[in-house]
Amino acid sequence: MPSWLQRQLKEAYQQKDMRQVRLLNQCWFYYKKTIPTSSQKQNEV
């Protein structure tokens, strides 16, 4: 998970901003789906 996203999630949880938490959670799952990780790249070869 990118550091900027970790930081944003931490702030949203601390402020109990559930709308922001949900939005960032959706961003993370979209990011995970669209940006292949190194382990996914190795499986393709």
Image (cartoon, grey):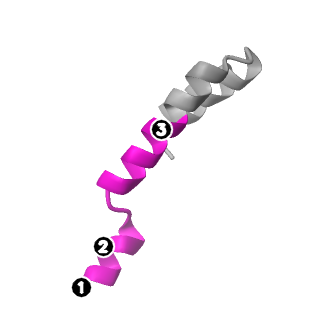
Query: On the image, numbered disc 1 is attached to which residue?
Result: 45
- The quadrant of the rendering that contains the C terminus is bottom left
Question: Residue at 61% across / 28% down in the picture?
Answer: 21
Question: Residue at 66% across / 22% down in the picture?
Answer: 18
Horizontal and vertical percent position of residue 14: 75, 20
Q: Which residues are magenta?
A: 25-45
Q: Find the distance from the CA under tag 1 to the CA under tag 3.
A: 29 Å
Q: Is residue 25 above or below residue 14?
A: below
Q: Looking at the rendering, which quadrant does residue 36 occupy?
A: bottom left
Q: Find the distance from the CA under tag 2 to the CA under tag 3.
A: 23 Å
Q: From the image, state whether disc 2 or disc 3 is nearer to you.
A: 3
Q: Give the SS element for disc 3.
A: helix
Amino acid type, residue under disc 1 in the picture: Val
Query: On the image, numbered disc 3 is attached to which residue?
Result: 26
Amino acid type, residue under disc 3 in the picture: Gln
Question: Residue at 34% across / 82% down in the picture?
Answer: 43
Q: Which label belongs to residue 41?
A: 2
Side of 33 where 1 appears, left or right: right
Question: Residue at 38% across / 63% down in the picture?
Answer: 37
**Viewer can see residue 2:** no
Closest to the observer: 38 or 22? 22
Side of 42 where 39 appears, left or right: right
Horizontal and vertical percent position of residue 5: 51, 33
